[in-house]
Image (cartoon, grey):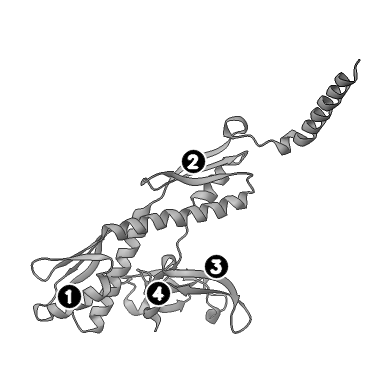
Amino acid sequence: MNRNVQWKLVVVLAVTVLSVVAIYPPEERIRLGLDLEGGVHMVLQVETDDALRVESETAAEQIGEQLDLQGITVASSSAVDATTIRVEGVPGDRDAEFRQIADDQLSASYDREAGAGGMYTFRMRAPVEATLRDESVRQALQTIERRVNELGVAEPIVAPYSVGGYQILVQLPGVSDVARAKEIIRNTALLELKIVEDGPAFSQEELLEARNGVVPPDMEVVSGVSEALGSGGPGGSSYYLVRRVAAVTGRDLRNARPSLDEFNQPAVSFSFIRECESMFV
């Protein structure tokens, strides 16, 4: 055998050995896709209308409170759908004041339409609506990515699925517990800070005693834990009466981070976006 053939055999053998080493063990080095390995494939629809509805309900609540502060009594101030606010019964002699307050509170996001009998309708502007919908999808993407990381999946895919369709594609190769993966991914979370009107109390009956057992239409009862009541009522729960519409939601926060309070206990520190800072001055 001549020398050239020997060198060729050595090179072929070396390349073969290196190739085997590079992919061994194959179950750890070679990542199979969904078509070969199986797993979870989901297309999730983001309910962007929910974000718009919260925005409109909060705005309607805030303008109602501002009117009360100025002594302007109206019949109602509410969100009639996800992008529309309606104020009814504006007194004719306070109309100019109302329009000034409405412009200060809503003109950045809503167009105003005057109707008969002191009725005003405010419709969310198209650019604002599009921004809120896109922001909802972006936040959903970030949330799903964090939850997928909890599953320990190698090379998952979490990405927008369609332009303008507000959908998210999720692919999790090799995931065998499909039910658990779906439960973790689909669970929704919304941060809301609501104003407490009454409480804490050991029971709902005690909480509503001064109101003849009736929950006001603009409020709701929530359960929690109170240090003031010790272990609380049955099961360790305490009860609070809070405003139904949140004063602050997660979209109003610029950032949030873990910290310690003045007693060196775990706490969460956060900063508001500029539009909300004036609410707490």
Instruction: Identify the residue position indicated by label 4 in the image.
Output: 274
Residue type pointed to by label 2: Met
Frontmost of labels 4 and 1 is 4
Instruction: Identify the residue position indicated by label 1 in the image.
Output: 99
Dots 4, 1 in contact, CB < 8 A: no
Q: Is mark 2 on a helix, strand or loop?
A: strand
Frontmost of labels 2 and 1 is 1
Find the distance from the CA under tag 2 to the CA under tag 3: 38 Å
User: Where is residue 136 drawn, in percent x and y?
Assistant: 41, 56
Find the distance from the CA under tag 2 to the CA under tag 1: 47 Å
Q: Is mark 4 on a helix, strand or loop?
A: helix
Q: Of the residues under marks 2 and 1, which one precedes in the sequence? A: 2
Q: What element carries label 1?
A: helix
User: Where is residue 273 drawn, in percent x and y?
Assistant: 42, 72
Q: Is residue 233 left or right of residue 90?
A: right
In this picture, is 172 found above or below 131? above
In which quarter of the view is residue 219 placed? bottom left
Q: Of the residues under marks 2 and 3, which one precedes in the sequence? A: 2
User: Residue at 83% of width from left, 29% of height from top?
Assistant: 14
Residue 195 seen in the figure: no
Instruction: Identify the residue position indicated by label 2 in the image.
Output: 42
Residue type pointed to by label 3: Gly
Crowding near pointer 1: few (<14 within 10 Å), some, many (20+)?
Answer: some
Frontmost of labels 3 and 1 is 1
Crowding near pointer 2: few (<14 within 10 Å), some, many (20+)?
Answer: few
Point out which mark residue 235 bears: 3
